[in-house]
Amino acid sequence: MLNEYEVPKSFWADVVSTTCYVLNRMLIRPILKSTPYQLFKGKKPNVAHLKIFGCKCFVLNNEKENLGKFDSKADEAIFLGYSLTSKVYRVFNRRILNVEKSMHVVFDEIVDLEENPLKPNKTNAGDEEYLKEALDEMYLNENPLVEPEDLVKSWKSPRGLSLENVIGDISKGVVTRNISDFCTTIAFVSQIEPKNVEEALQDDQWCIAMQEELNQFERNEVWELIPRDDSHQVIGTKWVFINKLDEDGNITKNKARLVAKGYRQEEGIDYDETYASVARLEVIRLLLVYASLMKFKLYQMDVKSAFLNEFIKEDVYVEQPPSFEDYKFPNHIYKLKKALYGLKQAPRSWYERLSTFLLENDFERGRIDLTLFIKRVREHILLVQIYVNDNNIWIY
Amino acid sequence: MIIIFGSTDNSLCKGFTSIMQGEFEMSMIGELTFFLGLQIKQMENGTFISQSKYCKEVLKKFGMDTPKEASTPMGTSCYLDKDESSIEVNQTMFRGMIGSLLYLTTSRPGIMQFVCVCARFQANPKESHLTTVKRILKYLKGTAYFGLWYSSGASPSLIDYSDVDYGGCKIDKKNTSGTCHLLGCSLVSWHSKKQVCVALSTIEAKYIATGNCCAQFLWMKQQLEDYNIYLNHIPLKCDNTSAINLTKNPIMHSRTKHIEIRIHFLRDHMNKGNCMIEYVDTKHQLVDIFTKPLAKDRFYELKRDLGILEIS
């Protein structure tokens, strides 16, 4: 954290305090499913005010001294953290070389990517030296400059600290417990579940998830781009974001799924038949009893992106996915070749696809239960029970 | 999209897996362990299904994860009525509780009847109804790990029980019919339902219950034929001798049309050889658990007989 914006190392205590502050509001405990802050206070933390540690910011120097007409109203400062008692930010004012607290801060969080590699060369060494000297002087003299009087309290411990009194090497950083195994899950999976595309686009992991979904569409040749025609009824599309959990409630995967707004479809134009039979729970129990009586094991398999496998009969047109429009033809629409989640005919078309496939492979359909398929070879029997569940989860 | 499959011959399973892999993209293949919230344990001598995880979630959701436990889901002296003078309770929460409990009956038939009784008051829940539902939750608290045990090795024969709680409902004096179907000692299907019409006599009430039972086992018989199990003369256990005699002798005691139709329906299936009605002693009547609240000892005895056990 110190290195990112080359904050002087003397601010290490602020790093620790800010880290605690942020982690308490961000880390979601796996089983309890809430942040430490939530557990303690009983309400959800507000994270809208969190900023990047050490970033450049501008603090209003109003009413502190007389300003001339053309003097600048703001001082450049380094962002150091948050106050524990009130809503103010702690910043290091570069002009008066002092730590102060203020509400009136404007942040410049943008990291200029092109400029970054040159950064060490650009910052003149003198500036760095000067800053450090000033800091040391400030700490040694124990004589802080002007501070708003109501905010002095919590800034006591680092003030009396001089570099000589610190045990160990300050450039070494703080040694914590081994966190490697928790990094493996947290680092590559986003812990949040965005409500809309705008939120999702802020997060790298979710961007990857959305791109993956679109790549899968390309691979499966789900749709083709065609010019918009007023005669087509076009159905909107929507992103749905779901975190997949394992049995203990840890997030294992971020799944973004593009769904069609099926409720806009009209009967007779966009779809004809929608009924798809679903297995009854009694059937599942009967199958379990039968398996245990005949002493054989049951297995399950999960068909990935079930609906993307099936061609549809009707002409259905959908809008381009929000925030992922084709930059050459932003006004074009997609003509669907295969069913999409959310379409009314999706479960049925999938059921038909699977049943024709199974019937071609010498299976016979159950006489009253249409979701059961049976294959008889001599005295042996193979039972296949299908359960189309995806549709229920994804309709919004 | 989930596919469950199994075969008496393992090579057929392998063949099926490979043709499916050739045609579709699979994300997971393995032994059936977790399906729609049901935890399934397949062991050497049988199969155990439970919903302990779901049960705990439900208890936590309704803030019942700390209170004391109850030994039975409902007291024997508990009779619910509309209770109009009492305080209203949050309807959304009440409905949420009923909904969660109804799904839990998938592996916990013991609470079926009590949940159904409480469900009748969803339109206008009062404090007394909420207390009853909380009693069920307290009972679940102590028995979260219970589930259905399906032991292997028994012969695949079907036995049906049906009974009725005469005049069970306090409000409109309709009866509660209960049925259950056991396939080789394993409880497969059951129901507990208030009858739609008022019965004038016990026999009439029994007939309505037995008719329902017959319709259900006909469905099961058909389904089992798909599994290569052909059953005939399925015993239908009933604890009322006069009801049994009525199916055997064509004397028309009953005067109402709907009962006449039910008698003919049953007699028809008896003549075809699909079923036979047998007498069962009240002591061995397993279906009591679906019709009325029972004392602790009897409740536990029936639970054990139906295969509702706890397995660690």
Image (tube, coloured by chain):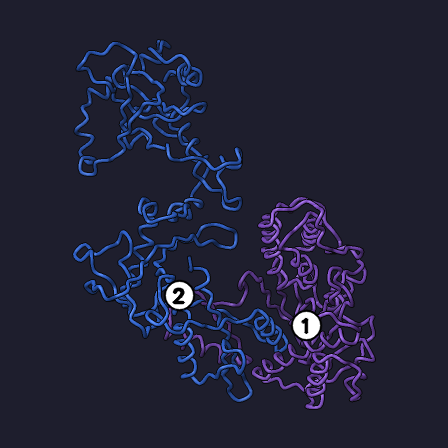
Chain colours: A blue, B purple
Taking the image as shown, residue B126 lies to the left or right of residue A64, namely: right
A5 vs B188, nearest the viewer = B188
Report the chain holding disc 2: A
Q: Position of residue B294 (x, y in %)?
A: 78, 61
Residue closest to the eye, B157 or B237: B237
- In the rendered image, which quarter is residue A223 located in? bottom left
The residue that mark 1 highlights is B186
Report which quarter residue B215 is drawn in.
Answer: bottom right
Which chain contains the residue that carries disc 1?
A: B
Query: Dot 2: what SS?
Result: loop
Report crowding for label 2: few under 14, some 14 to 19, many 20 or more residues within 10 A (C-alpha). some
| Residue A250 located left or right of residue B138 | left
Q: Quadrant of residue A46?
A: top left
Query: Disc 2 to disc 1, how far (Cα)?
Result: 34 Å
Name the quadrant of the C terminus of chain B: bottom right
- Point out which mark residue A280 bears: none
Image side of residue A124 versus residue B28, left or right? left
Query: Callout 2, which amino acid?
Result: Lys
Give the percent coordinates (x, y) of residue A98.
31, 16
Q: In the image, B222: left or right of B68?
A: left
Q: Is residue B311 visible?
A: no
Label 1, secondary structure: give it: strand
Query: Which residue has dot 2 on it?
Result: A304
- A36 vs A148, nearest the viewer: A148
Question: Where B84 falls versus B227 (above or below)?
Answer: above
